Image (cartoon, rainbow, N blue to C red):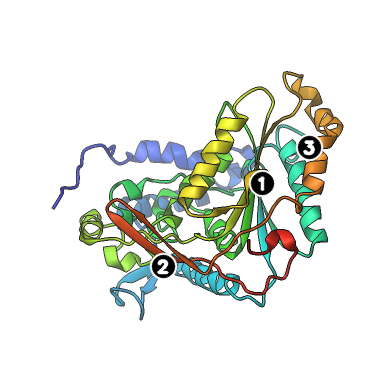
């Protein structure tokens, strides 16, 4: 049995540093008249931090779990129940075809930039096209992270690198109430991905890479690629138990396999092709099904032109706008009843979405 390596984690905060971090939330002078009440809240928060009260409200896991008596976070259980219900709806051939449109730009006109993103405009063109074909669309605008109060996608903690079964589906790392790591948007985002029959990602290039708002979501979707749906099997975050489970043979379930995907990546100077390839590789690895070469696009808008006129460049790029106005013509979603894939050291069997009766246009039919 391999050992769990220790020694990196810093010491716990001292009361003085905790006080500084806690009270920064109340720096506005308008809070001055409530300093006594804030001090009382700080006292409770310090005690919870000291005691490590990650999940203060729990309940026995119940039937269907490896350890039915294990106390699970009620917040995690509620998210897991929603994902199970969403999966059942997604597989129901009587429900409308549903496409998730993801805006990966950080910019919107409700925050410092003061202007909407070109990515948003492209997404809205595709939304209108899909709506005209009778397709239900959900929009995930990741720029809301920059402009909404206390909306967060907390960073992935890398549990999968300790052992795959330690990475729970859905993620159980958050909320962590003792550390103030709450308001995690991913509990809703997981449900949107599970509900979708197809996903289209729209993103700009930021410094040759994906924008940070998009990368946060990508990292937190690691639990969809082999994640453990039963936290009681590792009794929470017990690294030794997770390692033993993986070494005994882990199926690495692909929780989003079989959904179709498309990509629209745009830049102004460089990096669009490499980012498009990176995103394609990521989605292929999770065993989503690309909708064809014409649905994996990278383009430049306003090439080496001023940023100030980049929206004007999109206005003038009739070919680009026409591409999204006729998105349904080249984009043919694929599905299958089931498939099996093998990798060295692991064999994965998973059910792909099979719908005999599509409620949508030709580009969403089986091919």
Of the numbered discs in the image, which one, if any, rests on residue 168?
none
Label 2 to label 3: alpha-carbon separation: 51 Å
Q: Position of residue 315 (x, y in %)?
A: 85, 33
Mark positioned earlier in the residue sequence (1 or 2): 2
Check residue 320 in the rendering and tell me which mark sits there, or answer none. 3
| Residue plotted at (25% across, 61% down) | 249
Residue at (74%, 29%) from the top-left corner? Answer: 301
Vertical side of 145 occupied by 314: above or below: above
x, y (%) of residue 32? Answer: 59, 42
**Contact between labelled residues 1 and 3, with CB atoms less than 8 Å apart:** no
Mark 2 / mark 3, whichever is N-terminal: 2
Callout 3 environment at 10 Å: few (<14), some (14 to 19), or many (20+)?
some
Mark 1 residue element: helix
User: What residue is shown at x 81% (from left), y 33% (from top)?
Assistant: 314
The residue carrying mark 1 is 295
Question: Judging from the image, what secondary structure is the residue with disc 2 in?
Answer: loop
Q: Are marks 1 and 2 in contact (CB under 8 Å)?
A: no
Residue 277 in the image: state x and y as whole percent.
54, 37
Residue 13 drawn above or below residue 347: above
Seen from the viewer's position, the closer of residues 204 and 316 is: 316
For residue 166, side relative to residue 298 (left or right): left
Direction left: furthest residue: 1
Which residue lies under the disc numbered 2?
57
Q: Residues within 10 Å of mark 2 (few under 14, many from 20)?
A: few
Q: Which residue is drawn at 57% across and 72% down?
A: 91
**Left or right relative to 206: residue 63:** left
Q: SS at mark 3?
A: helix
- Quadrant of the image for the C terminus? bottom right
Please provide percent x and percent y for residue 59.
38, 74
């Amino acid at each position: 049995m391999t050992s769990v390596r220790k020694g990196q984690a810093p010491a716990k905060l001292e009361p003085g540093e905790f006080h500084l971090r806690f009270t920064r939330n109340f720096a506005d002078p308008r809070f001055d008249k409530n300093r006594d009440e804030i001090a009382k809240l700080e006292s409770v928060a310090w005690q919870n931090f000291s005691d490590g009260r990650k999940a203060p409200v729990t309940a026995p896991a119940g039937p269907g779990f490896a350890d039915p008596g294990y106390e699970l976070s009620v917040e995690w259980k509620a998210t897991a129940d929603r994902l199970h219900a969403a999966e059942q709806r997604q597989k129901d051939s009587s429900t409308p075809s549903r496409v998730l449109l993801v805006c990966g730009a950080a910019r919107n006109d409700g925050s410092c930039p003061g202007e909407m993103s070109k990515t948003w405009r492209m997404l809205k063109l595709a939304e209108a096209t899909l709506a005209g074909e009778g397709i239900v669309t959900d929009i995930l605008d990741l720029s809301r992270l920059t402009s909404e109060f206390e909306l967060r996608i907390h960073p992935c903690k890398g549990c999968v690198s300790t052992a795959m079964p330690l990475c729970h589906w859905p993620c159980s790392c958050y909320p962590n109430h003792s550390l103030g790591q709450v308001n995690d948007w991913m509990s809703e985002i997981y449900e949107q991905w599970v509900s979708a029959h197809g996903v289209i990602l729209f993103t700009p290039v930021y410094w040759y890479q994906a924008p940070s708002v998009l990368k946060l979501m990508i990292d937190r979707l690691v639990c969809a690629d082999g994640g453990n749906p039963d936290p009681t099997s590792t009794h929470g975050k017990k690294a030794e138990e997770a390692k033993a489970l993986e070494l005994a043979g882990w199926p690495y379930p692909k929780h989003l396999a079989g959904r179709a995907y498309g990509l629209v990546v745009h830049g102004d100077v460089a990096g669009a092709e490499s980012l498009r390839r990176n995103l394609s590789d990521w989605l292929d690895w999770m065993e989503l099904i690309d909708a064809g070469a014409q649905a994996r696009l990278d383009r430049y808008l306003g090439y080496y032109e001023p940023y100030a006129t980049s929206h004007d460049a999109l206005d003038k790029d009739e070919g680009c706008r026409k591409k999204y106005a006729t998105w349904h013509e080249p984009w043919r979603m694929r599905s299958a009843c089931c498939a099996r894939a093998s990798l060295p050291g692991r064999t994965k069997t998973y059910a792909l979405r099979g719908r005999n009766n599509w409620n949508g246009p030709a580009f969403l039919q089986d091919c």
